[in-house]
Image (cartoon, rainbow, N blue to C red):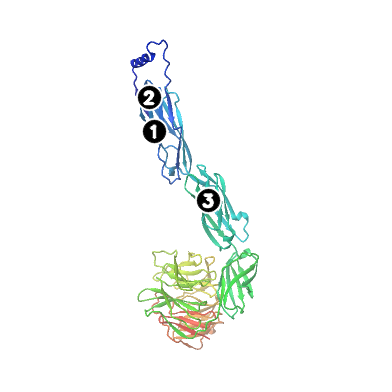
């Protein structure tokens, strides 16, 4: 409340003099009494507006009052403000018979969005500082104050959609009522092509947000996000409503292995999603029916393809009760290679150690990860071929590159790159994005030990090379997303069957963990004990389906995890034939030895078949084991006819019987 008093002096004699002058020289009638003093105000209302809570506080606005007809006494003016719209009222400044004050409102952020009101009450009186008596005519007067912290408001804070194979109208549309403060019209736009919205509306009108069928049909399973932006017609900032769309339809993601050889029948693992939503009536490869198929689970079908498929690309398709199944997998049929024995030189003379070796069956190429022990540098090296002869290699430098895998569809190499992975185009070796993993960016772990599962997931470790403390990581190359399921051995290594149906986790040290060999389910991100207790200093080697496996380079197990026998302790490295009947071991003697592991070993030890194969060159053994898991790294073609051995000196190509 502000009170201002101001004395007004009038002399009686002066009044008499004025009265006499008013007689006009002797008129007989008395002059009329002056009108009573009165109060007038301007304006009769005040309006403030802020464009949202983050806007600046509106400037104060003036209130002006005038007093007329006051002839004597002391004038007092009292101003009182009430209501949330009013923060303060300044002192009244009086000039002559006119007074003015400034009305201020609170900051918009202190109130938030809304319409707020207040009242300014003005009293004018004489001779009473409280205005309990002596109020002038028209006093008190009031001024209405309105303060809008402007915005659009929606009855829905966001829109979310969940679609399966059979969406209803209720699944594809959402509505919200849009009102404005102050009341106003609005316009709306969507920033994604799969959602259309009501273009404009009046205050209080409904906004419809509807999914658009054609763009939806092009989307694969997953979660997609967007925004609906509403713009007010007169005041306030745009209102942005988040939008989320989750698609859970029947979908085929991968076929594993994705490469087949012409003229050869085979079996594959087909991985997808939501298979239980349909009745699978058949599987085709580009229109050619599978010779057999079995639905294993809501995410897996095992199928066989015929030998009649010519070289080409064949979309894996389901015949089912749902015509809209997304088909993202292709079986690529190529002619089998006809390699001869060769020694592939590395692209430079710098001393190096291989840390991974992977065969690309679609392109008949090899890829290796190497560590240059003298400089600490690392590179991805590709050895291309025409299916018969290898050409000069290509080297791609990558920082701290200790792991390598080819994606389940063969489109990209995934290369460990310090604490993340780098995508490399498998066709032209162009380097793409590097995706960082969840491991501590300031720690001492680096990405290593990669294995490919049939669902497209790549299992790997953030591994410690100086201490205990590895972190199991699962990477989805299409989504470019990591998960860390929580398995942390001392160190780690992984191995997978060629069809990705079996991924094993092993540990070289008991410190901080057990010696269990674990079976990893990459889809569920869980693991179970196999019953095998064995510390391993090399990744597990498995055949095409996991019917045979060799742990720690020498211990042979079947698909039920029964120990069948052991290879000699002189084994430096081993790969298995796709059918699991043969183990090809690079021996300390320098020979490539062949073992029949189709049955349990007599007396527990396997004996080599024949005298062994003398290699065309010495691949060179890794002697410093600091950054690697084995003296050599080995791979094999899908037909089991060519073995590759990568060492410090060369990559040796060796046909096998």
Q: Classify mark 1: helix, strand or loop.
A: strand
> Is 156 rendered above or below residue 560?
above
Which residue occupies 55% across, 44% down? Answer: 204
Q: Which quadrant of the rendered structure holds the N terminus?
A: top left
Position in image of residue 291 (x %, y %): 64, 76
In the depicted structure, whether residue 418 falls above or below residue 243: below
**Pointer 3 or 1: first along the chain:** 1
Mark found first going from the N terminus, 3 or 2: 2
Q: Nearer the viewer, residue 264 or 567?
A: 264
Residue closer to the observer: 53 or 358: 53
Disc 3 to disc 1: CB gap under 8 Å: no
Residue 634 in view here: yes
Q: Earlier in the sequence, mark 2 or mark 1?
A: 2
Which of the 4 image quadrants contains residue 430? bottom left
Left or right relative to 624: residue 337 = right
Disc 2 to disc 1, how far (Cα)?
16 Å
Q: Which mark is residue 156?
A: none
CA gap between label 3 and label 2 equals 57 Å
Other residues around mark 3 within 10 Å, as few (<14) / some (14–19) / many (≥20) = many
Q: Is residue 507 visible?
A: no
Report helix, strand or loop for mark 3.
Answer: strand
Q: Position of residue 86 (x, y in %)?
A: 43, 37
**In this view, 646 is above or below 477:** below
Q: Are marks 3 and 2 in contact (CB under 8 Å)?
A: no
Residue picked out by circle 3: 188
Looking at the rendered structure, the secondary structure element under dot 2 is: strand
In the picture of the structure, the residue carrying the numbered disc 1 is: 101
């Amino acid at each position: 409340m502000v009170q201002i008093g101001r004395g007004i002096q009038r002399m009686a004699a002066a009044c008499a003099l004025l009265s006499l002058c008013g007689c006009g020289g002797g008129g007989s009638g008395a002059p009329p009494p002056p009108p009573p003093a009165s109060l007038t105000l301007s304006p009769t209302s005040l309006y403030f507006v802020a464009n949202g809570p983050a806007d600046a506080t509106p400037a104060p606005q003036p209130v002006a009052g005038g007093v007329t007809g006051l002839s004597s006494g002391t004038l007092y003016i009292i101003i009182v403000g009430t209501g949330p719209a009013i923060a303060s009222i300044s002192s009244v400044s009086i000039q002559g018979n006119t007074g003015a004050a400034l009305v201020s409102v609170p900051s918009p952020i202190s109130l938030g969005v809304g319409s707020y009101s207040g009242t300014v009450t003005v009293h004018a009186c004489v001779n009473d500082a409280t205005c309990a008596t002596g109020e002038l005519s028209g006093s008190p007067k009031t001024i209405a104050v309105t303060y809008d912290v402007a915005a659009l408001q929606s009855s829905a804070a966001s829109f979310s959609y969940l679609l399966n194979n059979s969406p209803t109208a209720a699944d594809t549309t959402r509505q919200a009522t849009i009102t404005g403060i102050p009341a106003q019209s609005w316009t709306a736009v969507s920033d994604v092509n799969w959602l259309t919205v009501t273009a404009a509306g009046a205050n209080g009108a409904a906004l419809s947000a509807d999914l658009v069928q054609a763009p939806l049909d092009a989307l694969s399973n997953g979660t997609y996000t967007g925004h609906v932006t509403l713009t007010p017609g007169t005041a306030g900032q745009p209102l942005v409503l988040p939008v989320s769309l989750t698609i859970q339809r029947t979908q085929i993601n991968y076929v594993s292995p994705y490469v087949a050889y012409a003229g050869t029948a085979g079996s594959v693992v087909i991985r997808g999603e939501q298979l239980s939503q349909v009745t699978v009536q058949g599987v085709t490869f580009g229109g050619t029916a599978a010779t057999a198929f079995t639905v294993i689970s809501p995410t897996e079908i095992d199928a066989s393809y015929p030998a009649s498929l010519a070289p080409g690309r064949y979309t894996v398709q389901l015949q089912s009760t749902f015509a809209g199944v997304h088909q993202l997998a292709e079986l690529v049929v190529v002619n089998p290679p006809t390699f001869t024995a060769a020694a592939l030189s590395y692209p430079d003379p710098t001393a190096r150690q291989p840390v991974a070796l992977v065969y690309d069956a679609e392109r008949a190429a090899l890829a290796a990860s190497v560590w240059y022990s003298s400089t600490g540098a690392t590179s991805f090296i590709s050895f291309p071929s025409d299916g018969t002869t290898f050409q000069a290699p290509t080297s791609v430098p990558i920082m701290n590159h200790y792991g390598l895998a080819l994606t389940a569809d063969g489109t990209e190499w995934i290369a460990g790159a310090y604490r993340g992975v780098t995508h490399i185009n498998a066709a032209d070796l162009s380097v793409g994005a590097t995706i960082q993993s969840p491991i501590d960016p300031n720690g001492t772990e680096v990405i290593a030990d990669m294995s490919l599962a049939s669902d497209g997931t790549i299992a790997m470790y953030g591994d410690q090379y100086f201490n205990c403390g590895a972190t199991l990581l699962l990477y989805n190359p299409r989504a470019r997303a990591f998960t860390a399921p929580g398995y942390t051995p001392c160190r780690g290594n992984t191995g997978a069957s060629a069809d990705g149906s079996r991924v094993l986790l092993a540990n070289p040290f008991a410190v901080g963990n057990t010696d269990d060999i674990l079976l990893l389910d990459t889809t569920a991100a869980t693991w179970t004990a196999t019953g095998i207790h064995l510390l391993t200093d090399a990744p597990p080697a498995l055949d095409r389906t996991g019917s045979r496996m060799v742990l720690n380079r020498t211990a042979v197990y079947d698909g039920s995890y029964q120990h069948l026998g052991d290879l000699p302790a002189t084994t430096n490295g081993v790969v298995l034939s796709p059918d699991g009947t043969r183990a090809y071991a690079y021996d300390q003697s320098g020979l490539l030895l062949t073992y029949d592991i189709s049955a349990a070993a007599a007396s527990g030890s396997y004996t080599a078949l024949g005298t062994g194969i003398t290699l065309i060159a010495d691949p060179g053994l890794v002697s410093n084991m600091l950054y690697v898991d084995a003296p050599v790294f080995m791979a094999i073609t899908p037909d089991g006819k060519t073995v590759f051995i990568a060492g410090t000196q060369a990559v040796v190509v060796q046909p096998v019987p």
